[in-house]
Image (cartoon, rainbow, N blue to C red):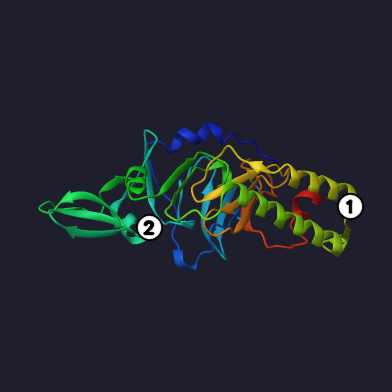
Amino acid sequence: MKKKRCFAALLPCIMLWQTPVFGAEQEEMTPPEYRCTINNTDEDYESGDWKYGFTVEEEPLFDLKEGEKHVFLLCDGKYVDAPVLIAKDTAYVPLWVLINDMGFELREEGNGLLLVRGNQKLTVSSKDSTLDTSKMLPLRDVSEALGAEVTYMRKGVMPLDNPLISVDFRETVLTEEEALEKAKNILISCLKAQEEQGYIHVDTPVNPEITRKIAADIDSLHLSEEVMAGYYLFEGMEYLPYILVEKSTGEMYWKSGFGDAGHGSYMEGIWKIQEGDPELFGSGYYF
């Protein structure tokens, strides 16, 4: 059973729509990994009225439904539980999200109330006025004023072509060239481990022709035109749409799957890459 979907046409639906992202304890999550797949419950799977379960670590967080858009928000690589309002391509979040979930501090100083992040300060109210923590503030303006890099991706990294806002205050440690070299070296280590092991998932022998294809793809890896705060995005691997390298830590991830669902084997995700993993290329290049 297949269902054709055109998700790009649905992007305007995020405009003027307050969308809760999800609820979970941030500290226990492993950023920025997730998986999203068909939630094949008995009552909806056979009919094709499918729901798509978004999961971080072991517990499903929520279902994505056809035609319903969610704005995902990352801060320093961690998923944030936040209602995000997009209006005229500007993202707004309540003040309490900045304070409770994104590491901002509200402080009295002089004649006003300040938002503080690290050694940066921003006046948000005069001292004699009441500041409602439900007040919606422009996320990019506030975050950039306090030293963050902010990007808004309309589609590509999150499941089902959903938009992503990434806010990152961390210091960049790796240059683009260093990150690219590291990514290639780790991918080559995985390919070598695969050759030494001699098989993929026990019953599938390593194919020299596929090995050459993977090696060529690694060699062609290059910086993506897409930009994601806190990460370098690299493209060039046919079955690994994006390679992500954290600018601050050098941790490396790969994006699996694309936003076009509509079949029972659908899965998207971001997964951490371990050096010398012999099964990294199995799911795409072999299966």
Which is more N-terminal, label 2 or label 1? Answer: 2
Q: Is residue 62 left or right of residue 86?
A: right
Q: Are marks 1 and 2 in contact (CB under 8 Å)?
A: no
Q: Where in the figure is residue 177, as x and y percent of width and height? A: 62, 47
Regarding mark 2 in the picture, which secondary structure is present there? loop
Q: Where in the figure is residue 166, as x and y percent of width and height? A: 46, 48
When asked about the image quadrant of residue 141, the answer is top left
* Quadrant into which the N terminus falls: top right
Which residue position is annotated with label 1?
Answer: 207
Which residue position is annotated with label 2?
Answer: 102
Q: CA distance from mark 1 to mark 2?
A: 47 Å
Residue type at numbered disc 2: Met
Q: Which mark is residue 80?
A: none
> Is 56 placed above or below 49 here?
below
Q: Is residue 279 left or right of residue 234?
A: right
Res. 48 visible in picture: no
Marks counted in the figure total 2
| Camera-side residue of 151 and 216 | 216
> Is 28 placed above or below 38 here?
below
Q: Is residue 170 left or right of residue 142?
A: right
> Is 144 placed above or below 15 here?
below
